[in-house]
Image (cartoon, rainbow, N blue to C red):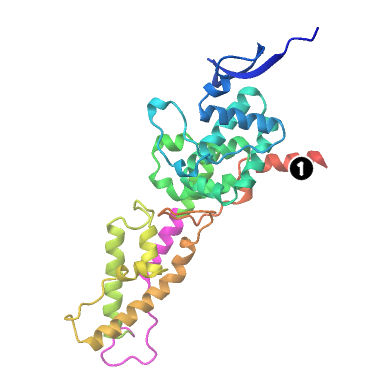
Amino acid sequence: MYPALIEVDLVVVPAADRKYGRLEIEAVAGVPQRAQPADLLSPKLRKIWGNVIKSLSGRTPFLKPDDPRVQRRAILAEQEEEPDDVLHNTKALITLAEELGATETVFPALDDAFEDLGHDLGEAVAEGPVQWLCISMTLRDSWIFKDAACHVVGKWHNLEPEVKLSIPEAARRVCQSYSDKLVQRCKDVEDFFMTVEFEPLENPGSSDLLGLSPHMWVALTRFREWVYVNISLANGFHGEDGGYNFYRYMYNEDDEYDEDWVPYLMDDDCPQEDIDEIHGYLHRLREFCQEEVEPLLKSNVSHSTGRYLTCTKIKDEDIPWYDDDDDDDDDDV
């Protein structure tokens, strides 16, 4: 007599202490005449558990959305389901790994998944840097920490207090410290804008004052007035964008900003010959400032489309677990 055929299903059942339920084995005699449990799971829940099983079996979890066209699709509240994107798929896998006590296997699999993502990981970090900063603290991922922290520092002045408090204390201290340094750098640059001067002429004429020609004085006055007005209107580091657009106007990285950087003289203000000379001096003043402001406009993130400064470079020794890694290396010797 042959043994009875038994089909084994893996079933996810609700559990009060588990966000994504509990995986159980269900044995069904013979060929089942009902819908399979896997068919009853939502695609999102099936993907979360599928990623855990992949990680535990030595394969790489899939973090990208199943359909890239719906990556940014809003999920309605009544659906009670998280978006299918890199951020939420990563968070779900971490949460489930912690609930299962499988972090030692799952976290290395996440490293492989991040490597497969390539540039897409930088885009994901740019879209949600605060959450990725928290993720980096859990995974102790230095690359994500530095990339996310750079974004967060650039946005620090606009973050709500509760958002800042959601960041683990060690990471929050790092961001606050670098934000203070960034503000000081911006202050120093804006001070330079307000005090920039021409070198006195070697052979001043009878109409020149303190070694500067009248055209120089007009250019210097209009330039400083423009700087003062922008700073008083909170277009500098106190502004919503942390001075980003103001500094871009000054630097003139592309033609988009070229028309707005200073209040040019109107055609009827004075003869065209004088206008041309004054504008020439205005451009010289701007050139003096470009060298000062350029470092603020450099980017140290892998991807950014935001209107905020991403010039901060997080040092390795400021990563919260940097000393712990050194201790681990010492233990291995």
Left or right: residue 124 compared with residue 262: right
Q: Residues within 10 Å of mark 1 (few under 14, many from 20)?
A: few
Dividing the picture into quadrants, the one containing residue 251 is bottom left
> Could you tell me which residue is drawn at 64 percent across and 23 percent down?
100
Q: Does 173 appear in magenta?
A: no
**Residue assigned mark 1:** 329
Instruction: Pick the residue in front: 149 or 88.
Output: 88
Instruction: Pick the residue in front: 116 or 11.
Output: 11
Observer able to see residue 197: no
Left or right: residue 14 compared with residue 277: right
Q: Position of residue 73 (x, y in %)?
A: 42, 39
The magenta-colored residue range is: 183-211
Q: Does 206 appear in magenta?
A: yes
Observer able to see residue 47: yes
Instruction: Pick the residue in front: 236 or 85.
Output: 85
Give the answer, above or below, for where 85 lies relative to 236: above
Instruction: Pick the residue in front: 99 or 273.
Output: 99
The single residue placed furthest to the front in the displayed view is: 1
Q: Position of residue 16 (x, y in %)?
A: 53, 15
Under mark 1, the amino acid is Asp
The single residue placed furthest to the right in the displayed view is: 333
Indicate the quadrant containing the N terminus: top left, top right, bottom left or bottom right: top right
